[in-house]
Amino acid sequence: MVSRLPSIACLRAAEAVARHRSFSRAAIELNLTQTAISHQIRKLEELLGTELFLRNGRTISLTPQGEDYLADIRPLVVGISHATDRLASGKRDTVLRIGSPGTFLLKCLAPRIGEFIALYPDIDVRMLTLDPYRVSDRDGTRDFKDLSLIVRYGLGTFPGHDAYKISTERIFPVCSPDLIGNSPIPLDPGELSRHRVIRTTTPLLLRDDWPLWLETAGVPGLAFDSEITCDLLYSCFELAIHGVGMVMGRTPLIDEDIAAGRLIAPFFAKFAVGIGVFFNRPLWQPGQRTGAAFPRLVHGDIFQRRPVF
């Protein structure tokens, strides 16, 4: 085991060189000379007892050991840099760290977060995409203790967390307008048999809602012409937008796409499911000035627009 740790200067130099694949660009970013960057890299490699970079003329590449090491240290170097910047700029208590599943982040937060930042420019927003296997209401761990709030799906039982309900999901098939052409809406549910259906295997959903919707629509057991399966909801919705097939839409995830005309709801049957979308705040989170931003984000006009359906 190495008896001493490398300096942060060495780690910053290695991270910058690995990202740019260039000593000169790393030197410009860190406001150092190329000689200083080379010296930091040499010190780090001597400490570790292995080469991190391969130099071939002007070409820089990572060794296998370098790939592994830089993948491990990059989050630490970036985290230290951000923490230092926040403290130096006096923003320690104005950081709002939001963890969200990728689909909600892209479909619901991304269209609105700019408005929130404009309204509250003193809040420094950090966004993290969460692993979908760790954000159901079955997870009562303290894994999210560093986040100000978390977007989660479930029934509302989140041990150790305050829960603020954003919406109850309503589900119904959606598709690109181009997929049905000039056919009058609503379509007969039986016409689904002629279309490709897009399904998801995401762990966020407790079940496949297509059979339930077919039963509600009066066509239980209807066979689809063809199917395609994706592991993420966002991928499913994007395929539908591009006319690949019909997907089971879920509010509020598809509200923006419907409002923009990228998706339409070609059938009449729509129904609410028990699962909902919640903002969570860890109960053990220490009081911060960003706590005031939490109710603003949840209860403000930004997230209280009337849904499409």
Image: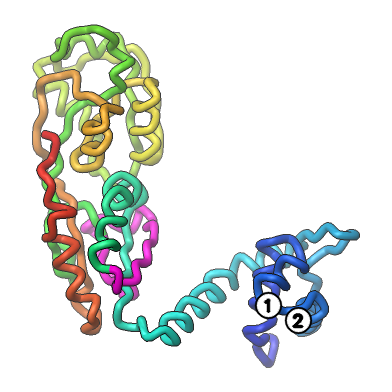
Residue underneath mark 2: 40
Q: Tell me which corner region of the image, top left, top right, bottom left or bottom right, holds residue 126.
A: bottom left
Q: What amino acid type should be assigned to the residue bearing mark 2? A: Gln
Kindly tell me whether residue 147 is visible in this rendering. no
Name the N-terminal-most of marks 2 and 1.
1
Residue 301 coordinates in the image, percent (x, y): 13, 55
Against 50, residue 68 (above or below) is above
The residue carrying mark 1 is 31
Q: Secondary structure at mark 1?
A: loop
Query: Do we see residue 83 in this rendering?
Result: yes
Question: Toward the viewer: 49 or 75?
Answer: 75
Q: Counting other residues with Cα less than 10 Å from the Cα at mark 1, is it few (<14), some (14-19), or many (20 or more)?
A: few
The picture quadrant where one finds residue 65 is bottom right
Is residue 165 located in the magenta-colored stretch of the structure?
A: no
Q: Is residue 81 left or right of residue 49?
A: left
The main secondary structure of the magenta stretch is: loop
Q: Give neighbour class at mark 2: few <14, some 14-19, many 20+ (Cα, 10 Å).
A: many
Q: Position of residue 210 (x, y in %)?
A: 22, 27
> Residue at horizontal 18%, vertical 10%?
190
Residue 134 falls within the magenta-colored stretch:
yes
Residue 187 placed where, x, y %?
16, 12
Q: Residue at x 33, y 15 (%)?
A: 178
